[in-house]
Amino acid sequence: MPTGGDELVAALERAGVDTVFGLPGVHNLPAWEALRTSPIRLVGVRHEQAAVYAADGYARATGKVGVALVTTGPGAANTLGATGEAWASGSPVVVIATDIPTSLKRRGIVGGALHEAEDQQRLFSTLTKQTFRLDAPGDVERAVNTAYEAPRGPVFVEIPTDRLSAVGPTWDVGEFAPDVVEDEPEGVQQALELLAGTWKPLIVAGGGAIDAGPEVAELARRLGAPVLTTYSARGLLGRDDPRAVDLPPHLPAIGELWDEADVLIAIGTDLDGMNTMNWRLPRPPNVVAVNVDPADASKNYLPDVVVAGDAALGARALAAGLPPAGADVWASVVTARRRARGAVRGDHPQEIAFLETFARVVGDDVNVVADMCIPGYWLAAMYQPAGPRRFQYPMGWGTLGYAFPAALGAAIAGPTLSVSGDGGFLFACGELATAKQERLPLTALVVDDGGYGMLRFDQRHSGTETYGVDLETPDFVRLADAFGIRATAVDGLSDDFGTTLASHLADPEPTLLVARAALTPPPTTSPRWHRQGPPTWADPLAGLGG
């Protein structure tokens, strides 16, 4: 007779799950036993937070749902930081955790059973789309579908440990088939009427448009619109589209495109604070939003029209209502990019040299996962990936320590390079064991500046002496060697760095590269934003059009 663990794994298989990241505990071992004979790949990590980061990295790299399986109480609680990042970034992740046996559960009383929490589901309620306690037909498949359906985001599933270990039917497995309905987006005609009277359209595409690159490109071609992307949509149009700006509005020459536009078409983005310098970019005279969630589309820059629907369907419907021949781009994207890069090069020659070396060495097939660190900030601002889903950055919650554990999941999809600072890498350095055990095609780059470089800059920028930001760090090469992982250290981020990085990326086994260097933060970091003052919506009349 099958156990509840067998039923759980069978349901995951029916839902199309092919990889699970997790950590075993006494309460979830029946699921581990069921995975022993399942075609699902089990990747065992060294910390529960890493399981969810890895599931998130896998989801972003593949476009599939990432699944993490952990144990009760502290095991579940350890995932909350990573679950929050998935929530803030709209990443489809399913966190599955056990709960204490139903026979020991008493409403309103915490009796002290092993790993007991008063209400595990409530821990996750503000960081997930939905929480489930596994007791209804098709709940596992329903949870996976809920994470994936727009707007995407994480869900939490709780299973009492006695139901997981019980032999025989433990719940009515049933069947679940999602309703697949592609409704025509609303608001298209009103948007076309508005666009007919404008001359300088600008498209901003976000993470909700990550799979709508061709549709966004066609809309931009017919409008003659430059296209900006948020951090979550880097590489959306590839490198060759003449309308792809590939730089952020934090650079003055690019911000001028925003200033001059007479209509903004926001596709799959809520125009958050980090992409708008905390909403200091002024609201253009007209705003059209394409978004599956009208409330999400309207919370920052009030749109004149909301096209309520999927990014691809909405962009396609708008393009279909425009002349097919296309229009000339109203601004010179090449000139804007040249001016923006030239200004940065003058102030930051070392950092530009790093970016150019990085672009020359890192192949188009490599997934790049950057952390909240100074080299990661530079890559998020100015690195041009070959296409969508080739670059990841934790700019939802801004979680330090994301890159290396998330890269474990991205490496399931193919060659991967994580970029961390020395401080952030130490959050999860134990996952070197996971990379080695799974023989992942993963290069971990650690840029070692002896501490928390961004915070050091913040303190100096505010005129105070540095304190608590300089770190004692291990010999990273010897640390990697202890895990049986090839490691190299270089000084600087120029020629020797490029040659060594190329050799690491060519190695199909996991490796570690340490570059001893200190960089200055880019203009995309908040202390260096060129627009200061209150956010535009602080004015009660702002965002009302006209």
Image (cartoon, rainbow, N blue to C red):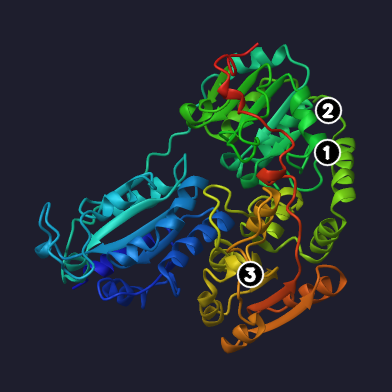
Tell me the quarter of the image containing the N terminus: bottom left
Q: Helix, strand, or loop for circle 1?
A: loop
Query: Residue 403 at x, y = what percent?
Result: 59, 62
**Any part of residue 176 in sight:** no
**Residue at coordinates 61% horizontally, 63% vertically from top-left?**
469
The nearer-to-camera label among 1 and 3 is 3
**Residue at coordinates 82% horizontally, 46% vertically from top-left?**
240
| Residue assigned mark 2 | 329
What's the CA distance linking mark 1 and mark 2? Answer: 9 Å
**Any part of residue 500 in sight:** yes
Q: Helix, strand, or loop for circle 3?
A: helix
Which one is earlier in the sequence, the residue at label 2 or at label 3?
2
What's the CA distance linking mark 2 and mark 3? Answer: 43 Å
| Residue assigned mark 1 | 242
Query: Residue 19 at x, y = what percent?
Result: 46, 66
What's the CA distance linking mark 1 and mark 3? Answer: 38 Å
Q: Quadrant of residue 471?
A: bottom right
| Residue assigned mark 3 | 422
Disc 1 marks which amino acid?
A: Pro
